[in-house]
């Protein structure tokens, strides 16, 4: 009897030893739901066409207001599986007040590890290695692509199987080191979302989450007709797919030879120049089109604007400190838009007091509380408490050497929390996002003029901007009125 029991139990033990772990079982079930392993691996190309809204994160009128939206039409993405390529072309139109062309065509690609952009003239340029990594992860955030990646590459690592409600979840690490989380619907076994973590200069560690729904059968393969992406808590793109096509002619998805032979561009060096524009006032320009201004008081310096990101703002702060033996103690952050508040965290880490419009402060406190562990910044490595000086309607910074008046821009249709500065001694206006001599349109120009001349009754001779070049105020007004 004992021998017979062993005969029955040995096959069970063998079966237990050879059964796939739950992570692998989940991938196999997802592949079956998508059409079967052979169908998934047999797909050569996938073309996705559609349209949808693409909100512009970090550019809303108020920090807690609705995001401005680009309407994306003529969206077309071609995925070439054998050649590891992706090319995306789209037309997008601003559904908000925008200072340049409302309609933009974009054409971007990924060829292996080479990211590239195609200009409207047809010429190609190579994008950075960081952009290539981002596009590779973006490519993987499609159910057919991520499941195929696991099936096709034995070096892919699976871990962390778990259940959450009606979702089954597995962690995926590709052979290139990309880490993603795949969620599968427990009932249909179809992939429901893919999530990856990345660094955002303003928000720190953020999840990019892409959800899939409304699957349809295309040539025996199940493909989603709605693809919705969020970054952190913000919507990023809600694509309604009008057409999925399997194994159509991919056309030309290769990077141009001139792009492939070019080296991936390195981050440009941060050049900061200091131009004296009045006694005790310097305009910090140099790289790019985001400038800052330094004001010298009796015993300290004040900076207007910490823009873009930590790299740029740290270079600006260092340059400001080189202009005088007096300490730099405060920075005026004009408004909450991400390209103007990107230096918030490094300014706090450097011990500067933040002067800003009062309604920015809760939003800034949230940004300061966020973790930056993926790419640790100076504040993550050197935690310091933030010091704020809120401005309601106006504030004057004044001593024997300098007077700077700060004013809230009232009733502007685009800039709800903006502070501009005025130096009465020099009849000088210092401002951000109110005017740029390079803009095509100045949709909010009339409001700016009203604020300066009628509401605040300021007499201005010269404008010293964050964007664009220094000009006579009269020239600024003339341009705004000529190009409303």
Image: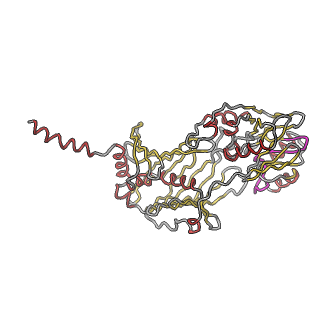
Q: How many marks?
A: 0
> Is residue 427 part of the magenta span, yes or no?
yes
Residue appearing at x 75%, y 31% in the figure: 389
In this rendering, is residue 244 above or below 318?
below
> Is residue 194 part of the magenta span, yes or no?
no
Return the residue nearer the eye: 187 or 169. Answer: 169
Residue appearing at x 36%, y 55% in the figure: 35
Q: Is residue 107 visible?
A: no
Q: Position of residue 111 (x, y in %)?
A: 52, 62
- Give left or right: position of 30 versus 60: left
- Give left or right: position of 4 versus 152: left
The way the protein has been coloured in the rendering is secondary structure
Give residue 363's quadrant in the image: top right
Q: Position of residue 212 (x, y in %)?
A: 47, 48
- Give left or right: position of 70 versus 149: right
Return the residue nearer the eye: 105 or 324. Answer: 324
- Give left or right: position of 58 versus 167: right
Q: Position of residue 426 (x, y in %)?
A: 90, 44
- The main secondary structure of the magenta stretch is loop
Q: Position of residue 170 (x, y in %)?
A: 41, 43
Return the residue nearer the eye: 89 or 395. Answer: 395
Q: Residue lying at the far front in this picture: please name it.
A: 325
Residue appearing at x 39%, y 52% in the figure: 155
Give residue 231's quadrant in the image: top right
Q: Is residue 373 visible?
A: yes
Please give the range of residues in magenta: 422-442
Q: Residue lying at the far left in this picture: please name it.
A: 1
Return the residue nearer the eye: 54 or 263. Answer: 263
């Amino acid at each position: 009897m004992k021998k017979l029991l062993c005969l029955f139990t040995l096959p069970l033990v063998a079966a237990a030893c050879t059964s796939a772990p739950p992570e692998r079982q989940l991938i196999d079930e997802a592949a079956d739901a998508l059409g079967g392993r052979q169908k998934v691996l047999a797909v050569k190309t996938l073309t996705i066409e559609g349209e949808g809204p693409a909100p512009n994160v970090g550019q809303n009128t108020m920090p807690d207001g609705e995001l401005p939206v680009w309407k994306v039409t003529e969206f077309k993405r071609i995925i070439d599986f054998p050649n590891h390529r992706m090319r995306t072309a789209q037309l997008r139109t601003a559904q908000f007040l925008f200072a340049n062309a409302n309609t933009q065509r974009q054409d971007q690609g990924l060829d292996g590890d080479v990211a590239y952009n195609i200009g409207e003239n047809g010429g190609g340029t190579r994008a950075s290695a960081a952009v290539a990594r981002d596009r590779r992860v973006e490519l993987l955030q499609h159910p057919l692509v991520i499941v195929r990646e696991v099936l096709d590459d034995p070096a892919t690592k699976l871990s962390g199987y778990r259940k959450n409600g009606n979702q089954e979840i597995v962690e995926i690490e590709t052979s290139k080191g990309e880490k993603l989380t795949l969620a599968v619907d427990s009932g249909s076994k179809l992939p429901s979302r893919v999530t990856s973590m990345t660094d955002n200069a303003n928000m720190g560690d953020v999840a990019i989450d892409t959800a899939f729904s409304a699957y349809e059968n295309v040539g025996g393969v199940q493909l989603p007709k709605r693809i919705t992406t969020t970054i952190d808590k913000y919507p990023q793109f809600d694509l309604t797919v009008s057409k999925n096509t399997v194994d159509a002619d991919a056309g030309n998805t290769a990077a141009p030879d001139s792009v492939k032979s070019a080296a991936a561009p390195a981050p440009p060096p941060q050049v900061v120049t200091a131009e004296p524009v009045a006694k005790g006032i310097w305009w910090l320009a140099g790289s790019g089109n985001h400038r800052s201004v330094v004001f010298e008081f009796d015993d300290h310096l004040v900076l207007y604007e910490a823009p873009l990101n930590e790299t740029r703002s740290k270079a600006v702060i260092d340059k400001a400190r080189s202009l005088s033996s007096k300490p730099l103690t405060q920075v005026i952050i004009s408004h909450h838009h991400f390209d103007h508040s990107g230096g918030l965290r490094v300014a706090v880490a450097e011990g500067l007091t933040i002067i800003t419009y009062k309604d920015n402060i809760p939003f800034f406190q949230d940004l300061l509380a966020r973790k930056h562990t993926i790419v640790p910044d100076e504040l993550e490595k050197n935690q310091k408490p933030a010091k704020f000086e809120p401005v309601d309607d106006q504030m004057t910074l004044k001593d024997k050497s300098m007077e700077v008046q700060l004013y809230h821009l009232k009733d502007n249709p685009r800039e709800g929390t903006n502070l501009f500065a005025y130096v009465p001694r020099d009849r000088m206006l210092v401002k951000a996002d109110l005017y740029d001599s390079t803009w095509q349109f100045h949709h909010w120009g009339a409001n700016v003029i009203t604020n300066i001349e009628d509401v605040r009754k300021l007499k201005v001779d010269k404008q010293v901007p964050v964007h664009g070049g220094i000009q006579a105020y009269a020239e600024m007004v003339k341009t705004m009125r000529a190009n409303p």
